[in-house]
Image (spheres, rainbow, N blue to C red):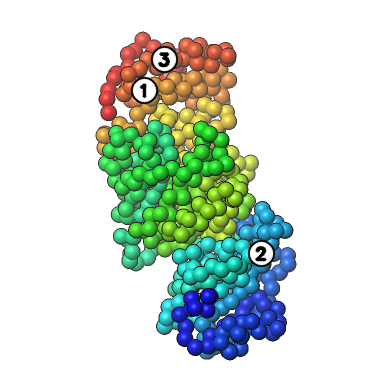
Amino acid sequence: ALRSSLDVGGALKIGLVNFDDKSSTLPWEVFSGGETPRLIRFEAVSENTSWSDLYPEWIDEEERWNTPTCPHFPMPTKHKNLNLHLVAAKVPCDRAKDPKDWTRSVKRLHTLLVAARVALDTGQRQQGYTYVLLDDECRPSPNIFPCRELVSHQGSFWLFKADLKRLEKTLALPPGSCQLSVPITGTSRYVAHASREAYATILHSAQFYVCGAISLARSIRMSGSKRDLVILVDENIHPHHREGLEAAGWRVIQIQRIRNPKAEPESYNEWNYSKFRLWQLTEYHKLIYIDADIILLRNMDFLFQMPEISATGNHESMFNSGVMVIEPSNCTFEMLMQQINEVESYNGGDQGYLNEVYTWWHRLPKHMNFLKHFGLNDSEELAHRLELLGSEPPVVYAMHFLGLKPWLCFRDYDCNWNQQKLHEYANDAAHARWWRVHDSMSKKLQGYCLLRSKQKASLEWDRRQAEQQRFPDGHWRIKIRDSRLRTCFEEFCYWESMLWHWGEDQQQPPPSRAALVDNNSAAAVVTT
């Protein structure tokens, strides 16, 4: 049945990768129709090479101290005039011995990359494709041999019709995140597929992230990009919020949510597997997915040339899914759904899940998903991060706002300062950058960033706690001049009264002269 799936007449020229000796070639000689298969010899990767060597937690991206290098992955000698119809490879699978980390096997990755290299070197260029047959008890890496190229799957055999141009680009990448896959200064390219490329995000809770999504759209347009903007929302989106998203430039697509089967009801991660719906946007060849709590400071269109999955590092060997390049495909979506009850996410969410599926990912510079996080023990590294943040013109491409979001704070300062546990996310310069984007929006769109009465009360409560504890940064002393303080769009506007019973099990500090508002002043009521 596999033989009939090959669009090749006559005897097959086959190359065998990772087969032990000539005795193992006999079945393949029968399969080929009488042609003797070619055994492809290659040197094994060093036994001392570990997955953390390929995927270190940190590399010197800016080459301030050294130039990052990757472990040596030996490749077979390229033979001139060797043309093959099919490359067959026996891929090691240690799932039974190591059910947790079998996907992070150095030998397994090496074998897959050798098979890809042989296929590229021996494929018939005029056809543009070649066949690769993997004998693999596990599922092959989805971004070395993607499911859209899968012709047939029978038992442990996976037959792919591999695109040679794609293989060439894949093999030009580093073998892991041990080196950057794109220069830290970015790059430029000829715009050939702009109509099939888009920036995308998703909303799980419209109430809190509509403003963030609107500011993200504005920042993308401020960067000069003209690519489509696509946002996925669920049935809970309010028509008012949908109108604002569309006015900001988003193409709004309503989806059916996907529940995380391992999440607790009403938990933060209950519906975050809905992100898998991005792979169903098959009218696009490439998507740059960006979380709604990020703004762009520089144009990132050049990332559309990168393959799936390209992302910045997070911790250990994991990537951060806040910014990532993906390639929509219905079969990829089906693959993600098929494994939804099996894959163990390290953080219980979509980021952990995707890291288990896409263990072979490509490192983007941290500038392209700059985490607003300053809780570092390394004073030199902290100073460097602060320097990057304040650079004009910006050096950072995308700012990722961790902690309390800037639109949920008053504009006067970063409200993360008023909670001890959130100090590591506090930075007034980053906060001010977000507000520059906000101020460039129309008044109508700014209306989607107004504060609810309950949030105003929460901010004042945190400020009073900071005052009581006499936080040395002193932000709690700053008088609030943000016009949203006295702007109300709800039926109940007397937010100060909420504080009468707020935290009744704690001693409530009395208001001071630095309080957010003069309690004798009345709040203005507006509608948006």
Q: Judging from the image, what secondary structure is the residue with disc 2 in?
A: loop
Neighbour class for label 3 at 10 Å: few (<14), some, many (≥20)?
some
Q: Which residue is mark 2?
A: 93
Q: Which residue is mark 1?
A: 485
Q: Amino acid at mark 3?
A: Glu
Question: Residue 360's quadrant in the figure?
Answer: bottom right
Q: Position of residue 274 (x, y in %)?
A: 45, 45
Query: In the drawing, what numbered circle is on residue 496?
Result: 3
Neighbour class for label 1 at 10 Å: few (<14), some, many (≥20)?
some
Query: Quick check: 185 above or below 432?
Result: below
Q: Position of residue 258 (x, y in %)?
A: 47, 44
Q: Amino acid at mark 1?
A: Leu
Residue at 56%, 84% (x, y): give it: 32
Q: Quadrant of the C terminus?
A: top left
Look at the image and tell me whether residue 53 can be seen: no
Residue at 43%, 78% (x, y): give it: 128
Residue at 42%, 63% (x, y): give it: 305
Residue at 53%, 62% (x, y): give it: 142
Which residue is most to the front?
Answer: 1
| Left or right of 212, for residue 89 | right
Neighbour class for label 2 at 10 Å: few (<14), some, many (≥20)?
some
Q: Position of residue 226 (x, y in %)?
A: 30, 54
Question: Residue 434's quadrant in the figure?
Answer: top left
Give the Cα distance between marks 3 and 2: 62 Å
Q: Position of residue 202 (x, y in %)?
A: 41, 44
